[in-house]
Image (cartoon, rainbow, N blue to C red):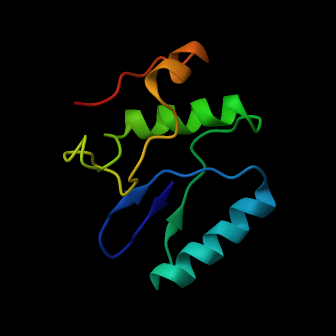
Amino acid sequence: MRTNPKTGAEYVGRAKSAAHFEARQAAHDTKLGVTHKYKVIDNAKPGTKLDVAEESAIRARGGANNKSNPNGTLENKRYQMNEERYRAAGGKVDKPN
C-alpha cells in the first residue's frame, strides 16, 4: 500500500517481486513528486493468487474511487478483478457500496 504523507491518500497496488516493488516505489515517487510511505500488506504468488490478494485489499479498504463507486476511499481508479472472476478464484470480500 502506498500512502501520501502530505494528504493521507492511499493506493493499493501490487508487484510481482521485491525488485519490482522497489522500482515501482521510485517511479511513483518521481511521477507524483512526493516520497510516499509503502507497506506490504499481503504476499501471494504472481498470477490469479496475486490478483485476488490485490482485489481483496482494495475491497477491504473502501474500494476504488471511480464513477461506479464515487465514495471509494482509495486513489485506485479501478478494481483488479470483476466479481465473477474474483469469486471463482476464491475471493471472499464484498465490494463496498
Residue appearing at x 39%, y 34% in the figure: 59
Image coordinates for residue 76, horizontal then vertical, percent = 40, 53
Q: Quadrant of residue 4?
A: bottom left
Q: Quadrant of residue 22?
A: bottom right
Residue appearing at x 36%, y 40% in the figure: 61
**Residue 49 to residue 36: above or below:** above
**Residue 70 to residue 90: above or below:** below
Image coordinates for residue 54, horizontal then vertical, percent = 55, 39
Residue appearing at x 52%, y 81% in the figure: 31
**Residue 70 to residue 46: above or below:** below
Image coordinates for residue 20, horizontal then vertical, percent = 75, 61
Q: Nearer the viewer, residue 85 or 27?
A: 85
Residue appearing at x 53%, y 23% in the figure: 86
Q: Nearer the viewer, residue 39 or 25?
A: 25
**Residue 26 to residue 19: above or below:** below
Q: Nearer the viewer, residue 78 or 24?
A: 78
Q: Nearer the viewer, residue 72 or 37?
A: 72
Q: Is residue 40 left or right of residue 18?
A: left
Which quarter shows the C terminus?
top left
Q: Is residue 87 visible?
A: yes
